[in-house]
Amino acid sequence: MTDAAELRRRTQEFLAANPPARTDPLDFLRARFDAGLAWVHFPEGLGGLGSPRSLQAVVDAELEAAAAPDNDPRRIGIGLGMAAPTILQYGTQEQKRRFLRPLWTGEEVWCQLFSEPGAGSDLAALGTRAVREGDTWVVNGQKVWTSSAHLARWAILIARTDPDVPKHQGITYFVCDMTDPGVDVRPLRQITGEAEFNEVFLTDVRIPDAHRLGGIGDGWRVAQTTLNNERVAIGGMRLPREGGMIGPVARTWRERPDLRTHDLHQRLLGLWVEAEVARLTGERLRQQLVAGQPGPEGSGMKLAFARLNQEISGLEVELLGEEGLLYGDWTMRRPEHVDFTGRDAGYRYLRSKGNSIEGGTSEVLLNIVAERVLGLPAEPRTDKDVAWKDLAR
Amino acid sequence: MSTQPDLLYSEEEQALRAAVRDLLTDHCGAPDVIARGESDTPHDAELWKLLTDGMGLAGLLVPEDQGGQGASHREVAVILEELGRAVAPVPYLTSAVVATEALLACDGSAELLTRLASGRTVGAVAVALHLAPGAAFPVVRLDDGRLHGELTGIADAQAADVLLVPADDGGLYAVEAGAVTVVPQVSLDLTRPVARVLFQGAAGQRVGDAEPAVRRALRAAAGLLASEQLGLADRSLAETVRYLKERKQFNRPVGGFQALKHRLARLWLEVVHLRAAARGAADALATGEDVDVSVAVAQAYAAPVAVRAAEEALQLHGGIGMTWEHPAHLYLKRAKADSLAYGAAGAHRAALAELVDLQAP
C-alpha cells in the first residue's frame, strides 16, 4: 500500500533513474512496468504496487509532465482493457508472468476472438469447437468483428468444449497464438470503406492446455470478467465541455454562419444540452468510482453515448449542406485504432452506427438495465436447460 | 474548464436527505395532499412548521449572522429533491429560495431576511411563475409612496405573509399580505397554486433594486428547480417499477414485457443524466463558477425528463393512473407546471445560444 505522496516520490525517483530523453522508449516502458508504475492497482511483480486504482492518476500526471514515452493505449486497448484484467483474475502465475509485461509495453498486441457470425448478442451460442488431444486443444471455427487481429500476437478466445451440456456450461476460455499456421485473418471491409475489423478463420489451430484460462467449461464465467471490463472502459473517461462529437459541429456552426438555419439551430442546441449532460453524467460516474462508490450508472453510459453520437453526426452531415453530399475517401485502409471523432462528418456519421451494436447492442443493454438495475423480470428463456447441440440453429 | 463541479452527495447531505424523507413519509401522505388540494388551505402549514421551526430548513441560504444556517445551494437542492418526491404542498422553493435570494441581493432587508430564515414569515416574489431569469417582468405603479395595480400568476401568494413587489420606479418593495387582495386562480398544479394579487394603494417598504434581485432569485430558482424535478422523476420511476413487478396481465408480471422494460430502462437512464445536470447546477450556484451555463443546461434538460417520467407513470399504471385517488396525477400536474416554471426549456436553450456562442441564423 502506498499513498499519493509516496507514489509521487517513487515516480520522481524512477524518472531520475530513467530520464525519458536519454532512454530508449521500449526500455523505459519495461523499466516502468518492473518498477510497479504501469498499473498501480496490479500486484507487485506484475506491473503494480497493489495500490488503489485511483492513484494511477498521480503517476500519470508526473510522467506526462516529464514527457515520458507512453505505451500507445489506443493501439493496445483490447489487451489493456480486457485481456489483462482477465489474465490477472484467472491466469496461473506462469501465464501472468509470460503475458502481462509485453502486453502492457505494447510489444505484443492482443485481440479478442469472441463474436461469431451466428453468435453476436447471443454470444453463449457460439459454435467454434475445441477438442482435446492429450495436452493440446484442436480448434476449428470462424470468428468475426475482430479488431487488431492483423496486428495481434495473441488472442483471448472462447470456444465450445462440450456440446452436450447447456450452452453457458460447455465453453472454455483460451489464449490463442495468432502466429499459429491454422489462423487465417482476413480484413472485413465496413460501411466506412475501411477495414478496422477482421474475420478470423481457425483451422486445426493447436492450443496447449497451458494456455487455458480458468477451468474447463468455466469459460462463460471467465468471459464475464472480460465483458464487464469492456463496459467499464467505455464509461470512465474524462472530457472537457464540447470534448466529444458535439465539438466539431459547434465549431462548424461558429465558423460558417452561411450554413445556419432556424431548424438546425434548435436541433443543435438540444443536442448540445444533451451532450453536456452526458458529459456531466460521465464525470459524475468517474467521481463515484474515485470515491469508491461505484453505482449501476455505468451500464447506461454506452447507451447514451451511442444514441447521442448518432444524432449529432447525423445533424453534422445535414449542417454541411452541399459538402455533406461528399465523402472524404473510400479507399480501403487498415487503421491501427478506431477514431470515432476523426476524419470527416460522413465518416463520423457512418462509423457511429456501430456504436449501438459493438460491445453489446443497445437493445441487449436495455434489457440488462431493466433486469439488473431496476429488478424487472427476466425475459422468458427457452435455451437455458437444453444441450447446446440440441438448440435450433 | 480546469475544475470540474463536485457532482456527488456529501455524507452530511445524505443525512439531511434521510431526515427530511423520514419527516415527509410521516407527515406528507398522498391522500392528504390530494384532499388538501381541493380545500381552501392548499398549503400544509403544519408540515411547513416541522420543516422550518423543527429543522431550521428555511434559513439554509441565509448567513448565520443574519439568523440563517449559512449552508449552500447543494443542501437546498437535496431538500428540494425530497420535497419533489413527495409533491409537498409547502412554499419552500418560493420562500426559502426565491424570496430569500431576492432579499440577499438587497441592502435594506436584514430584518425581513431573518424573519424568512426562521420560517415564521413566508415570503413570495410577486413575479409570475413562468418567467425565465432574464425575462422582462410586469411591475406595479408607485404613486405617492403607495402601490397600485395587479400582478398575476404569483406562486404560493396565498401562503405568503410578505410579498416582494417590483414597482415602476425600479425598486423592490416589501408589502405585508394584509395590505393587498390575493385572489386564488384555479391552478393546474394544486400543490403549488398561483394567484392574482391586487394592489389598491398598498403601503410598501423599499428593500432594494428590483432588477438584480429578481434576476438573482429566478436564476437560483431555475437551477434548483432541476432538483425538485429530479426527485419527482425518480419517485415516478420507482413507483412505476414497483407497480409493474406486481401487476399481472396475460399471466405474467407486466414488467416482464420487453416493450415496457425498454421504456423504463430509457427513463432510468434519463433520470441518471438529470441527476448529474441537477447536481451540476446546485454546485455551480454554491461555488459561483459557471453558474449561467450550468443553470441553463439543467433547466433545458430537466423539464422534458420530469414530464416524461410522470406521463410514463400514468400510462404504465393503466386505468388506476387516471383516477383521482391515485397520486400519479399529482406528479403529472407538478411536472407539467414545473416545465413552465422559471422559464421553459426553450427559453433556457435560447439563453445558452448566447452563453456558449451558438448564435441563431
Image (cartoon, coloured by chain):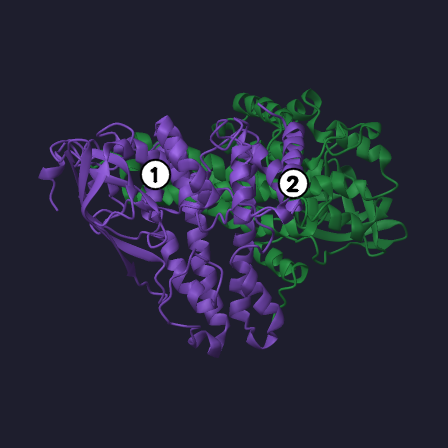
In the displayed orientation, state which residue is furthest to the right: B144
- Which chain is rendered purple in the image? A
The quarter of the rendered structure image containing the N terminus of chain A is top right
Disc on res. A180: none
- Find the distance from the CA under tag 2 to the CA under tag 1: 39 Å
Residue A120, horizontal then vertical, whole percent: 26, 47
The quarter of the picture where residue B178 lies is top right
In the displayed orientation, state which residue is furthest to the left: A390
Q: Nearer the viewer, mark 2 or mark 1?
A: 2
- Of B187 and A254, nearer the camera is A254
Residue B238, horizontal then vertical, whole percent: 43, 33
Amino acid on which the number 1 mark rests in the picture:
Ile
Amino acid on which the number 2 mark rests in the picture:
Glu
Dot 1 alpha-carbon crowd within 10 angstroms: few under 14, some 14 to 19, many 20 or more: many
Would residue B314 be found to the left or right of residue B151 on screen?
A: left
Q: Which residue is drawn at the image coordinates 42% and 41% (left, top)?
A: A103
- Of A386 and A65, nearer the camera is A65
Dot 2 alpha-carbon crowd within 10 angstroms: few under 14, some 14 to 19, many 20 or more: some
**Picture layout, residue B65 above or below residue A108:** above
Q: Are marks 2 and 1 on the same chain?
A: yes
Q: Which residue is drawn at the image coordinates 39% and 47% (left, top)?
A: A109
Residue B158, horizontal then vertical, whole percent: 67, 38
Element type where label 2 sits in the image: helix
The residue identified by callout 2 is A62
- Of B53 and A100, nearer the camera is A100
The residue identified by callout 1 is A368
> Chain B is which colour?
green
Q: Are marks 2 and 1 in contact (CB under 8 Å)?
A: no
State whether residue B159 appears in this view.
yes
Would residue A221 be found to the left or right of residue B155 on screen?
A: left
Residue A169, horizontal then vertical, whole percent: 20, 31
